[in-house]
Amino acid sequence: MIAVTGAAGFIGSCMVKRLNDAGYQDVLAVDDFSRPDKNRNLEEKQLWGQMHRLNFVRWLERNHTDVDAVIHLGARTDTTEQSIEIFNELNLEYSRALWMLCAGFDIPFLYASSAATYGLGELGYSDNHATIPQLRPLNPYGQSKQDFDVWVL
């Protein structure tokens, strides 16, 4: 099974479709699922099931042997939101928890950073590991993604 976080969002639902097109039907869609407009993105997708993101960490702890990979696309992406606490909870701490579980259970973990980490681009747009800690995002969303990138490295 492949778990996709952020599965009800545009990019996540496109990933689910791509997995389905590649023959994967045992996809676990992980998201908030509280917005009906986003849930339509999963219509006609082949899923093993759906799970609220708040239940996924505990479920993964118990069912890690059933998971072949986690594709982590879920994040709070509202660049106008100014609450650092929301971003730290959803984009940093949640991502860390998933990373630690996947690393501990040897589950491949793919995640999406963000162009928002580059700030004004004054240091360019390189993914060179030495440059990443020097980047200066312009908003709390970008900073939360940057904080996770630096933590991972």
Image (tube, helix red, strand yellow):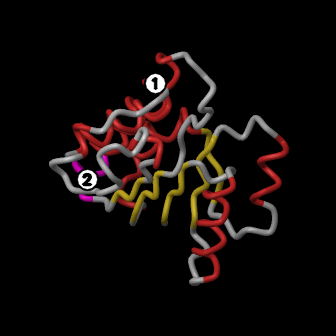
Q: Which residue is mark 1?
A: 89
Q: Which residue is mark 2?
A: 105
CB atoms of marks 1 and 2 within 8 Å: no
Name the one closer to the observer, 82 or 74: 82
Q: Residue 65: within the magenta?
A: no
Q: Which residues are magenta?
A: 101-106
Camera-near label (1 vs 2) is 1
Q: Secondary structure at mark 1?
A: helix
Residue found 66% across the figure and 71% down from its top: 17
Residue found 57% across the figure and 64% down from its top: 27
Q: Amino acid at mark 1?
A: Glu
Vertical comparison of 46 with 57: above or below: below
Farthest-out residue, left: 130
Q: Secondary structure at mark 2?
A: loop
Residue 10: x and y, percent?
69, 55
Q: Is residue 138 left or right of residue 37?
A: left
Residue found 35% across the figure and 57% down from its top: 109
Vertical comparison of 126 with 52: above or below: below
Of the numbered discs 1 and 2, the one sitting upstream in the chain is: 1
